[in-house]
Image (cartoon, grey):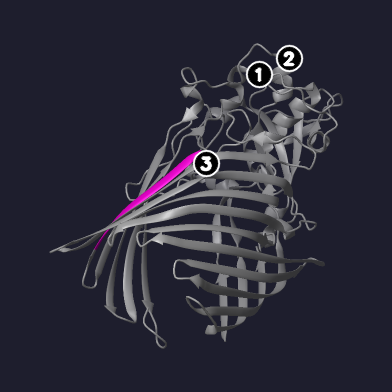
Amino acid sequence: ASFSHSQYEATISWPQIVAALANNLYLGPQLGIDEDSGYPIFNADPGRLFTPLTRAEYDSIAQRTVYHPQSQSDTLAFTFSNLDLFQLPAGAAGFAGVVEYGYQSYDLKPDPLATQYYYYSWKDSDGSGSRNRWAAAGELRMPLLDSLSLSVAGRYDDYRFAGNSADKFTYSAGIEWRPLESLLVRSSYGTAFRAPDLHYVYSGVGNDETGGTDYYRCRTEEPDEDLTDCSYSDEGLIRTRSGNRALGPETSTSWTAGFVFSPRENFDVSIDYFNIDMRNQVQDLSTDRLLQLEANCRIGSDVNGNPVDVSSPSCIDAIARINRLANGNLYGITVNPVNVARERTSGVDLSAHYRLATGIGDFRFSGNYTWTREHLFQQYTGDADVDEFQVNSGFDIPRNKASASVSWEKNAWTVTLHGDRLGRLPNSDSYDQIVDTEAGEEAWIGATYRYNLSTEYRFNERMRLSFAVTNLFDKMPPKDPSYPSSPYYDGSWFDSMGRSYYVQLTTRFGGGPL
């Protein structure tokens, strides 16, 4: 039996510009209302816009916003096992099971002023909520023959949140066959279930000011211009986002097949094919993709001339989410998390490990590579599949990823250098480009590399100290020259976190060794 409790509390603050104070500094007092447009009248000095602020002027319009977020998670679990449940020709069958109950909660506790129109260009959302869950699971492993083993598992989960319930029975099965001592052939099939994250469900309404390309006006009013040169390539937008209490759970099925070859005790290589079919995956709607989709739906064809069904569920939804003024200008867009109807992917995983023993210690080398064959997306039932690797699909995902590491171990010391490689990604202009093998390189951001270094010292079997450096060479995200606004890089794959240092002391007071 076990009980675990974790709790997070923080105080986070940063400077924000107060809208009223900034307007007064730059525009001066309001002199009235224009009868024709309804806009306020100011006698602003244009030179003020091009005059750098002094420190005192900045301080006069800035204020620190303070958040106090907190979260909690509790789990009570009972596990049981029997490694000799019954006998089979090749040995005893083993069983393990678990029954658990859990509670999770979170509360953003934002600055109350941040949820109003108080700070410039920003109205944040609040969010708080909780859920209860319980689950029961069991796994049975059966050695059918000396060279053949079978494992089966089942699990039932039940979640209660926001007046809703989500429950599912999932199962999996795997088979391993060893025709040779050095060769293991394996395959598996399984189903999965995942309840939506709390903030996807409980997030309140919030606004921010963002920008986007008005693909509809660019394609209809300036069809001969590249998108980067279009007059509507960087239109201002008020984006409204909220949670979705009607979200359902994510489900999936997957199967794998592959082998592990180990010709020597200190070397092995594995190759596995994977095929995953996800349904009702929870994703935030993309502003850029909605703008692309709205243009396709209003025009009746995509940028390549392929026909688009204006009456499809995605078209009806996209057009309803975009708000335009009477003159046709973009004004606002509404986004929230939704259950994606379907997403499918398949590919190959390759992995290798090698250990070299020397007089100065053991060296371990490992490498992993993933190549994705296809990645298809369908937002609503009835929509056509979208190929996420198509350069103008509105998605930006790499086709391949890789990692490698080398470790040195001697006595109580371990030092590891780890590197990650992310394959190339489409750049911000790729929607307007049809890429071929010769002329399309300008539509891509090249592969990127990041390195981490860690070291560990083991005082004894129950205590160890580790030190790690992430982003060892302090690499910043790759700049995308075509990105229309700050921060000029793809925020879905990169962040500006520089070199970081971590120290961790781990000790165990009871039970077995670490």
Which residue does the numbered mark 3 point to in the structure image?
Answer: 372
Which residue does the numbered mark 1 point to in the structure image?
Answer: 231
Which residue does the numbered mark 2 point to in the structure image?
Answer: 221
Seen in the picture, residue 420 relative to 51 is either above or below; the reply is: below
Closer to the eye: label 3 or 2: 3
Which of the image's four quarters has the C terminus? bottom left
Residue 24 percent across, percent down from the top left:
66, 39
Q: Quarter-wise, where is residue 377 in the image?
A: top right
Residue type for callout 3: Thr
Q: Secondary structure at mark 1?
A: loop
The residue lying at 62 percent from left, 64 percent from top is 172
The residue lying at 61 percent from left, 79 percent from top is 98
Q: Secondary structure at mark 2?
A: helix
- Dot 1 alpha-carbon crowd within 10 angstroms: few under 14, some 14 to 19, many 20 or more: some
The residue lying at 59 percent from left, 48 percent from top is 275
Single out the residue that lies furthest toward the bottom: 510
Which of the image's four quarters has the N terminus? bottom right
Single out the residue that lies furthest toward the front: 89
Q: Secondary structure at mark 3?
A: strand
**Distance from Cα at disc 2 to Cα at disc 1:** 9 Å
Q: Are marks 2 and 1 in contact (CB under 8 Å)?
A: yes
Residue 184 percent across, percent down from the top left:
42, 59
Specify whether residue 27 is in view. no
Report the front residue among 455 and 157.
157
Closer to the eye: label 3 or 1: 3
Specify whether residue 395 is in view. yes
Residue 230 percent across, percent down from the top left:
64, 18
Single out the residue that lies furthest toward the top: 224
Residue type for callout 2: Glu
- Dot 3 alpha-carbon crowd within 10 angstroms: few under 14, some 14 to 19, many 20 or more: some
Reading the chain from its start, which is encountered first: label 3 or label 2?
Answer: 2
What stretch of residues is rendered in magenta? 398-408
